Image (cartoon, rainbow, N blue to C red):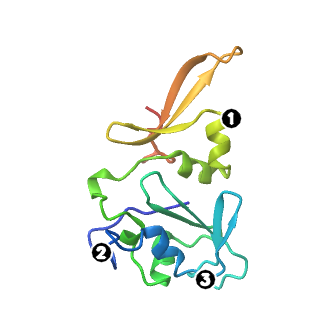
Amino acid sequence: MTTDPPQEHDTPTGSNEGGPTPWDRVLSRLDHVHQVGGAVIARCPAHDDTRNSLSLGTDEDGTVLVHCFVGCTARHIVAAIGLSLADLFPANRKGADLPGLTVERYAVAKRLPPEFLKERFKLRTIRRQSRFCVEMPSFDEEGERISTNYRMKLTKTDGIDDRFQ
């Protein structure tokens, strides 16, 4: 699932303090919304969808995550339902406090259920260096933790592999 961070010119169409949450606001504007296992799917409003190619979820802090398997961007998806990218984020979010990588985002990228990664591989989302990252422990044959990697993001930056720290 992809969620582009809000841009300065993006302003929420409504506050969620005492009102609808970002999740409720997005779901209320989509068609053919279904829950399949732990995932929510719907018709993508950004293209002529006939197969529910839009996958939706939420991050630990309430940010709505959207991913179109046809390739529509988050910006196009929210624009098609009359919202902005800022509407995907809780009202209390600050631009400098945007999360890095979470288990939920990592699971979508790997096309695996988040609970599977949490239970089988003991992955968890933690705060490190003032942002979210995925803690990835390694275990020996006896099940003892021998090391831990921290995945900070999914992609490399300009050819530099700074995903792990």
- Relative to 90, residue 162 above or below: above
Distance from label 3 to label 1 (Cα)? Answer: 36 Å
Callout 1: helix, strand or loop?
Answer: helix
Q: Are marks 2 and 3 in contact (CB under 8 Å)?
A: no
Which comes before the other along the chain, label 3 or label 1? Answer: 3
**Which badge, 2 or 1, is on the more N-terminal residue?**
2
User: Is 21 in front, or is 70?
Assistant: 21
Residue highlighted by disc 1: 120
Asked if the residues shown at circle 3 and circle 1 are in contact, with their CB atoms under 8 angstroms apart, the answer is: no
For mark 2, does the 10 Å Cα neighbourhood hold few (<14), some (14 to 19), or many (20 or more) residues?
some
Report the residue marked by disc 3. 47
Picture residue at 31% right of the left edge, 73% below the top:
15
Q: Say which quadrant the N terminus sits in.
A: bottom right
Kindly identify which numbered label has been placed on residue 103.
none
Q: Is residue 149 above or below residue 118?
A: above
Amino acid at the residue labelled 3: His
SS for dot 3: loop
Number of callouts: 3
Coordinates of residue 133 in the picture (x, y in percent): 45, 40
Q: CA distance from mark 2 to mark 1?
A: 40 Å
Amino acid type assigned to the residue bearing label 2 in the image = Thr
Question: Dot 1: few (<14), some (14–19), or many (≥20) neighbours within 10 Å?
Answer: few
| Residue sitting at x 30%, y 74% | 11
Q: Which of labels 3 and 1 is toward the front?
A: 1
Residue 19 picture quarter: bottom left
Q: Tell me the tag on residue 11.
A: 2
On-image quarter of the C terminus: top left
Judge the density around disc 3: few (<14), some (14-19), many (≥20) Cα neighbours within 10 Å.
some
